[in-house]
Image (cartoon, rainbow, N blue to C red):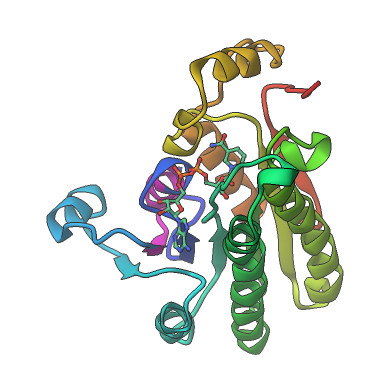
Amino acid sequence: MKGLTNKRVFITGAASGIGRSTAERFYAEGAELILIDMPTLEQAELTALFPNKMTYIQGDVTKAETLLAIQAEVNKGIDVIVNNAGITRDATLLKMTDDQWDSVIAVNLTSIFKLSRMAAEKMKAAGKGGVILNAASVVAHYGNFGQANYSATKAGVIAMTKTLSKELGKDQIRVNAVAPGFIATPMVAKMPEKVLQMMEEKSPLRRLGKPEEIAAAYAFLASDDAKYITGTTLNVDGGTILG
Ligand SMILES: NC(=O)c1ccc[n+]([C@@H]2O[C@H](COP(=O)([O-])OP(=O)(O)OC[C@H]3O[C@@H](n4cnc5c(N)ncnc54)[C@H](O)[C@@H]3O)[C@@H](O)[C@H]2O)c1
């Protein structure tokens, strides 16, 4: 398990859920981590998890000052970015406010555009290729009640992934997305128990996914085992089909 030895890997939304598991998996694979998230994490906690080769940037990926801090690290080199940070602000159409719409677009879509542009520019200049991985969702394919904003961003991520793979392929920069089903993380814990049970039933495997199962998909797509894979969206959803 050392397929990412000495790769400089940036992960947004790395303090919780899928991002946290992805950081742990990539660390086990030998990567040097640059983790980005909003909470102020205790240095002791971070050092316990990642005893070396880890930088934590505390900030909001929609804010210019955070992008500047990320740029400073990108300038030192970047092999992989996992654009994982994401939020939900659910409401049905007639109840959804402009703020609920705008904030989800800003985090889930616009930050991926800005960070991918930043990463690709450096990867292209370095001439060693690279990997951009984006967080999509099963709801991009099926829609989901109360998630006009969220599902639109995730469908946008899939289309952006395909487009960037066409634009960046000649520089050996691969761009892929992962579309998780319903995964047991703090994001999903906000949903009512009844809905979660329904989601379990919609998977042929009859359970929610685990964050480490999404981390495994990111680790595969980041590795050389996936070096002829670009422009694709890997569904990791236990076969979930939303009705
Ligand atoms: N959990 C699921 O079932 C599921 C399903 C499909 C897709 N996803 C996607 O996977 C990704 C991770 O989801 P999760 O379930 O681990 O969620 P989570 O809420 O557990 O973690 C998301 C992390 O992103 C961070 N974040 C949010 N906004 C940010 C910002 N503006 N700047 C920096 N960091 C920010 C949060 O602080 C948090 O640590 C998201 O993009 C989500 O849409 C999750």
Q: How far from the left and from the top, in percent, is residue 154? A: 72, 50
Q: On screen, 111 above or below 65?
A: above
How many discs appear?
0
Q: How far from the left and from the top, in percent, is residue 169? A: 81, 71
Q: Nearer the viewer, residue 22 or 18?
A: 18
Q: Quadrant of the N terminus?
A: top left
Seen as rendered, the residue at the extreme left is 44
Q: Nearer the viewer, residue 92 or 194?
A: 92
Residue drawn 42% across the image and 78% down it: 66
Q: Is residue 49 left or right of residue 70?
A: left
Magenta stretch holds residue 125 = no
Q: Is residue 35 left or right of residue 52?
A: right
Q: On screen, 118 above or below 204?
A: below
Q: Nearer the viewer, residue 149 or 209?
A: 149
Q: Nearer the viewer, residue 164 or 67?
A: 67
Seen as rendered, the residue at the extreme front is 94
Residue drawn 42% across the image and 86% down it: 72
Q: On screen, 85 above or below 219?
A: below
Q: Quadrant of residue 17?
A: top left
Residue drawn 63% across the image and 55% down it: 97
Q: Is residue 16 left or right of residue 187?
A: left
Q: Quadrant of residue 100?
A: bottom right
Q: How far from the left and from the top, in percent, is residue 93? A: 74, 45
Residue drawn 48% across the image and 42% down it: 18
Q: Quadrant of the C terminus?
A: top right
Residue 69 visible in the displayed image: yes
Magenta stretch holds residue 26 = yes
Q: Quadrant of residue 35?
A: bottom left
Residues drawn in magenta: 20-36
Residue 223 visible in the displayed image: no
Q: How far from the left and from the top, in percent, is residue 98? A: 65, 61
